[in-house]
């Protein structure tokens, strides 16, 4: 089955196998003549990155890369990236990779023209209006995993290395001008990354669907995103060369990030501080947290997940859905608790404190308090 499309929701998306060949025209469409490709260290020397740089160079767009990006990118990475952008005289960014490369690339494009410090733009109230919008450089985003959906996001998640807290930096112009979604770029993902990133997309859809906020478009997108993960993540995990499965998982990632405009919740509220403190993989941490959070939220979400289970062909309503999640995690080699992620004797008070101040708490259908969040965390340990 061949899957090719041109989409403009939520932004211009060039979707299909082999479409990385259009990287130069995507830069032209974004008005970029001297791009800086931003990616993470792990991708810097990989063939997909080298080939993309070759395409840019062949089109006369130069060959510049910044890859000093940690798995959980921080303000030090951002400072170094902005320096590389300015020193190289670049006029735009190709954000390339998984969540870390995409988030840091978008942040470099955002911060390169600003005069205020990074933390002045945290996603609090209307702090985003402090930015000089005209100074934000254009972005072309190229995901190489199928999970975060950062390629269609209006924010970057950045760790404050001094406080070990993940912060969300938001501005509407974080949204890339053009996205290239080429499932061939995901073929080389190891199976454990396929699982972790795929379950990140699933967590986005689950939490958006659970959120009490009103956004029926996001609700529908989240539901179909869950279906795509249910059908195609096991296939992509079993056979990384299954291009149809890889393509549908890229769609699910896009859909999860589009849907969570409706809100996230306790899964992310917990996984953000856990990841910031213990440097765990974000999507995998989400997957570990998900079963306990579903049970925690049962009084508020059982009815809507009865409906979701029917749509997904899962018998048993909400309880059946929870059993499906347990089985899916097990089939993909996901740990059952934080100990399985290598976290022994976690700092419960610190994690709970981080969860309660995380912006994701506002989208959880059950109000998160110190007492119930501590009990929830104990269910994951």
Image (cartoon, rainbow, N blue to C red):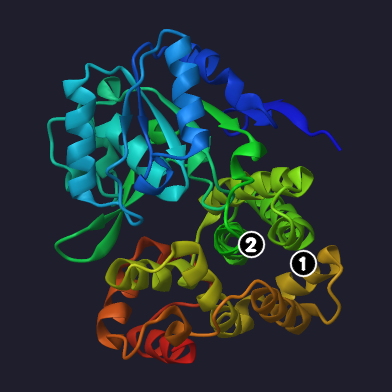
Q: Quadrant location of residue 307?
A: bottom right
Q: Nearer the viewer, residue 101 or 356?
A: 101
| Residue 125 vertical position relative to residue 84 in the rendered view, above or below | below
Residue shown at the point (85%, 69%) measured from the top left:
310
CB contact under 8 Å: marks 2 and 1: yes
Q: Is residue 68 left or right of residue 377?
A: left
Per the image, label 2 sits on a secondary structure element best described as helix
| Residue 144 vertical position relative to residue 114 in the rendered view, above or below | below
- Local crowd at mark 1 within 10 Å, few (<14), some, or many (≥20)? many
Residue 349, x across and y down, in percent? 26, 86
Q: Quadrant location of residue 306?
A: bottom right
Q: Is residue 38 left or right of residue 207?
A: left
Give the mark nearest the N terminus, 2 or 1.
Answer: 2
Residue shown at the point (59%, 47%) measured from the top left:
188
Q: Quadrant location of residue 2?
A: top right
Q: What residue is disc 1 on?
A: 308
Image quarter of the C terminus:
bottom left
Residue 292, x across and y down, in percent? 55, 83
Q: Is residue 177 visible?
A: no
Residue 123, x across and y down, in percent? 31, 50
| Residues at marks 2 and 1, CA–CA distance in whole angstroms | 9 Å
Per the image, label 1 sits on a secondary structure element best described as helix
Q: Nearer the viewer, residue 19 or 286?
A: 19
Q: Is residue 338 visible?
A: yes
Residue 197, x across and y down, in percent? 55, 58
Residue 378 circle label: none
Q: What residue is disc 2 on?
A: 209
- Local crowd at mark 2 within 10 Å, few (<14), some, or many (≥20)? many
Residue shown at the point (41%, 39%) measured from the top left:
45
Image quarter of the N terminus:
top right
Residue extending farthest top: 60
| Residue 53 vertical position relative to residue 276 in the rendered view, above or below | above
């Amino acid at each position: 089955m061949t899957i090719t499309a041109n989409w403009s929701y939520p932004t211009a998306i060039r979707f299909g196998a082999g479409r990385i060949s259009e990287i130069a025209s995507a830069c032209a469409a974004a008005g970029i003549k001297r791009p800086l490709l931003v990616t993470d260290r792990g991708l810097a020397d990989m063939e997909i990155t080298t080939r993309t740089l070759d395409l840019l160079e062949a089109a006369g767009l130069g060959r510049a890369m910044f890859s000093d990006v940690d798995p959980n990118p921080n303000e030090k990475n951002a400072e170094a990236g902005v320096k590389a952008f300015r020193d190289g005289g670049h006029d735009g960014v190709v954000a390339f990779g998984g969540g870390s490369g995409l988030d840091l690339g978008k942040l470099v494009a955002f911060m390169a023209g600003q005069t205020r410090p990074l933390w002045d733009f945290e996603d609090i109230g209307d702090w985003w209006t402090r930015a000089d919008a005209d100074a934000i450089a254009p972005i072309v985003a190229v995901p190489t995993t199928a999970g975060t959906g950062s390629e269609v996001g209006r924010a970057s998640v950045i760790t404050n290395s001094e406080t070990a807290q993940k912060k969300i930096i938001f501005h509407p112009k974080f949204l890339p001008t053009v996205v290239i979604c080429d499932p061939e770029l995901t073929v080389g993902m190891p199976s454990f990354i396929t699982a972790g990133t795929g379950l990140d997309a699933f967590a986005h859809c689950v939490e958006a669907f659970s959120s009490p906020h009103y956004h029926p478009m996001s609700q529908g997108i989240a539901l179909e995103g869950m279906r795509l993960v249910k059908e195609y993540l096991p296939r992509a995990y079993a056979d990384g060369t299954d291009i149809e499965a890889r393509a549908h998982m890229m769609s699910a990632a896009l859909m999860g990030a589009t849907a969570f405009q409706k809100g996230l919740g306790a899964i992310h509220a917990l996984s953000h501080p856990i990841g910031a403190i213990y440097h765990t993989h974000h999507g995998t941490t989400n997957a570990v947290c998900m079963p306990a959070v579903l049970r925690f939220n049962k009084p508020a979400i059982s009815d809507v997940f009865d409906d979701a289970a029917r749509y997904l062909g899962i018998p048993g309503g909400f309880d059946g859905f929870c059993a499906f999640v347990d089985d899916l995690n097990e089939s993909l080699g996901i740990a059952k608790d934080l100990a399985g992620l290598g976290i022994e004797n976690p700092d419960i008070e610190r994690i709970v404190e981080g969860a309660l101040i995380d912006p994701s708490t506002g989208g959880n259908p059950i109000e998160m308090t110190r007492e119930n969040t501590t009990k929830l965390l104990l269910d994951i340990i």
